[in-house]
Amino acid sequence: MNEYFNLIPFVIISSGILISIFIEMYSKKSVRIIAWFSILIFLASALHSLYYVNNEQLYFNNMLQVGGNVNIFIFIFNFSAALVVLMSMDYAEKYGNNIGEFYIILQSSVLGMMFMAGAKDLFVIFLGLEIMSVSFYALAGLNRARLKANEAALKYFLLGAFSTGFIVYGIALIFGSTNTTSIPLIVSKFSELTHNFLFITGILLFLIGFSFKMAAFPFHMWVPDVYEGSSTTVASFFSTAGKTAAFSAVIITLGAVFMYGNVNVFEPYLSILAVASMLYGSIVAIAQNNIKRMLAYSSIAHAGYLLIGLSSGNFEGIAGIIFYLSAYTFMNLGAFGVVALIEGKDETNLTFDSYTGLAKRQPLLAAMLAICMFSLAGIPPFAGFFGKYYIFIAAIKADLTWLAIIGVLSSVISVYFYLRVIVLMYFKESETELIIEKGNYGLLSVVISVLLVILVGIMPGSLIDVITSFLK
């Protein structure tokens, strides 16, 4: 029985989905009960995965791994989902759309992410991806009364299904050229397979499909409209846990390849994608007047920074990506959390003008948003700075100094639109009155996110040491 102990997070979330469905069916106060029950199971799963992070084990004919960095990903998925539930309780009440289905679909998406992060077989990645993606399509359009939400769900579904086609075709070509879908077996033969045109084409199609999920240029076209049309709390989940899940799947397939000293034949593709994503995201974000769209383009730029780690193709790159994803999750959740608190009914207070003079009216919210913006810009001593630092160091060690320099230039460009928000909050006077409905649960979620951003920034070495210990 002890050998299955590490699978408890999967059991908790799977059982939680079934129990939540029964609560929804038979309880008159199901919404509030399911919300708190969701937080309970997410926290239980997150804490279990963190406590048993050293217990690495394979299950189901070596198709699923638990322990090590997989548990770090499981922690990120579950803890971020718990914070999103906290945010959503007040936010959904504001819009009169607090329904139990939201929390059940959120649980389902987390289960899919956990399968993606622990996969040791291409079909398990695909299974997790489909569970997550279908849940995301539903979450994007759950607020059916908003036309923008319906548009977001349809765009996400159509482009998501299109990208899944690339992944399926890629898996088919990989299987056709290797006669296996087992990732460890593919890795063991990788040096021979690099001469096989079908195999390389399959991996490239696989990467293109996941480039959609990562929100990397030029596969980013769905991101601004989906983030703007979805509920703000849902958009925060897409941009953090969703992006982390996509990178976890690519790290499993390509990361394993890099760790065996093979030549990184995908470096040119990944480098071009990184440069295009960073520069496009940073430059276009400057022109935005809607804060959700600005954060959407910012998400594209951050996908570019993360792709530098994949381009590096070394231990430091993989460790840097995992660290960056941990930091990015909490700083972006904090930023979206403040936006959700300030947002009024009927999608008001979403322009930059709404944040003018916020420091005098809501000093706590302004301070927390400023910390998140500083961290997203990569300004020390916050977590975002160290995330970029580890990624750039990995690039330099891989003789990709030019890529690190472009990354620094992109960061300098991004400082403009992040600091623009801070300047408006602290150095401009507001001419209109801003009415903010109190949301204690949402505020608690933002406070926790900001504290984690500060904590990771103060002690980056502790997290990076844990991550690297499982890569060697």
Image: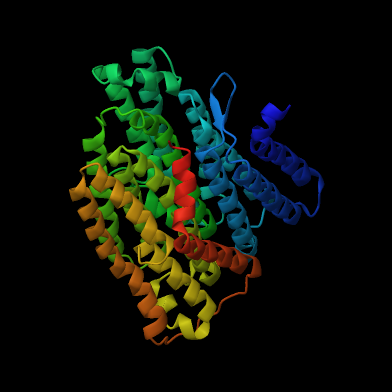
Camera-nearest residue between 198 and 10: 10
Q: Is residue 472 left or right of residue 115?
A: left
Q: Can residue 190 be seen in this view?
A: yes
Above or below — where is 66 with respect to 350?
Answer: above
Q: Residue at 55% of width from left, 79% of height from top?
A: 435
Where residue 370 appears, as percent x and y from the top left, is 43, 72
Q: Position of residue 431 (x, y in %)?
A: 42, 87
Q: Where is residue 416 in the image (x, y as percent from the top left)?
A: 29, 69
Instruction: Tell me the quadrant of the picture where the C terminus can be found.
Output: top left
State whether residue 154 appears in this view. no
Image height of 70 relative to 186, above or below: below
Report the number of discs.
0
The residue lying toward the viewer, choosing from 96 and 367, is 367
Judging depth in this view, the residue of 128 and 2 nearest the camera is 2
**Quadrant of the snapshot with the N terminus:** top right
**Colour theme:** rainbow
Say whether residue 14 is left or right of residue 467. right
Q: Quadrant of residue 374?
A: bottom left
Q: Which residue lies furthest to the top in this view?
A: 179
Residue plotted at (39% across, 30% down): 256
In this view, the residue farthest toward the left is 402
Q: In this view, does 118 lie above or below 325?
A: above
Report the residue at 47% width, 41% height from top: 469
Q: Position of residue 406 (x, y in %)?
A: 21, 54
Q: Is residue 216 left or right of residue 466?
A: left
